[in-house]
């Protein structure tokens, strides 16, 4: 634990984004079913390259989503609006995730204040967003990944 003392900011980040916190609201098992709706476009692949959930590559890898800056998976070609929102401080927590997945384009327009902002994700989730967020976090509970997403 000594290295945590040397990096107090990092240990605070770990506390804030610990899996316990991320798992607070949703039902992981129900979320696993909801994830089937995402699979056409999203996979969950660990930093070591292990495929945790098979899925398409139209959308970015969702591993380690909780606490991650929006639009920040390296090598994925995001739309401009999502990258801008991330650079302006948008991070994926339950609240932002629920609002985004309900209507990505409307969410981006609201958060960027740009009423012609576009989303490359043309899918709206009607229900189960809290559950699927908990599911994604539960299969990403590798602390190393959470830490690297905070320090990149
Ligand atoms: C038809 C394909 C498609 C489906 C289905 C889909 N997505 Fe996406 N998703 C995308 C694309 C494309 C992007 C990139 C958006 C951009 O760059 O504007 C994206 C981006 C995201 C992001 C932002 C990730 C980041 O790195 O910032 C999240 C979160 C997300 N999707 C969650 C979901 C969830 C959860 C589901 C299922 C309920 C889902 N998506 C279903 C295509 C899809």
Image (cartoon, helix red, strand yellow):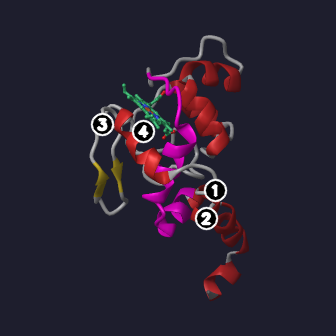
Q: How many marks?
A: 4
Ligand 1 positioned in quadrant: top left
Mark 4, residue position: 34
Q: CA distance from mark 2 to mark 1?
A: 6 Å
Q: Position of residue 34 (x, y in %)?
A: 42, 39
Q: Is residue 124 above or below residue 132?
A: above
Between the residue at mark 2 and the residue at mark 3, the CA separation in whole angstroms equals 29 Å
Which quadrant, please, contains the C terminus?
A: bottom right
* SS type, badge 3: loop
How far separated are the C-alphas under marks 3 and 4? 18 Å
Label ID, residue 24:
1
Q: Secondary structure at mark 1?
A: loop
Q: CA distance from mark 4 to mark 1?
A: 17 Å
Q: Residue furthest top?
A: 116
Q: Which residue is mark 3?
A: 57
Q: Is residue 4 above or below residue 112?
A: below
Q: What residue is rendered at 69% in x and 21% in y?
A: 110
Residue 25 pos. (x, y %): 63, 51
Image quadrant assignment for residue 14? bottom right
Give the magenta range. Answer: 123-149
Q: Which is more toward the observer, 89 or 62?
A: 62
Identify the residue at image location x=37%, y=33%.
Answer: 37
Whether 91 is among the magenta residues is no
Residue tagged by mark 2? 20
Could you tell which of marks 2 and 4 lies nearer the N-terminus? 2
Q: Residues within 10 Å of mark 3 (few under 14, many from 20)?
A: few
Is residue 115 visible to us here? yes
Q: Secondary structure at mark 4?
A: helix
- Disc 4, ligand 1: is the CB inside 8 Å? yes
**Residue 42, how many percent across, how many down?**
36, 39
């Amino acid at each position: 634990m000594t290295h945590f003392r040397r990096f107090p900011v990092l240990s605070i980040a770990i506390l804030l984004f610990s899996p316990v916190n991320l798992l607070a609201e949703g039902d992981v098992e129900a979320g696993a079913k909801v994830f089937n709706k995402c699979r056409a476009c999203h996979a969950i692949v660990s930093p070591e390259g292990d495929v945790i959930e098979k899925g398409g590559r139209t959308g970015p890898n969702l591993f380690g989503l909780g606490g991650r800056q929006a639009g920040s998976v390296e090598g994925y070609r995001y739309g401009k609006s999502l990258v801008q929102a991330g650079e302006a401080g948008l991070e994926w927590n339950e609240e932002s995730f629920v609002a985004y997945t309900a209507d990505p384009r409307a969410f981006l327009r609201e958060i960027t204040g740009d009423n012609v902002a576009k989303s490359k994700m043309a899918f709206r989730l009607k229900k189960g967003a809290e559950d699927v967020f908990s599911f994604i976090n539960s299969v990403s509970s590798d602390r190393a990944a959470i830490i690297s997403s905070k320090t990149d």
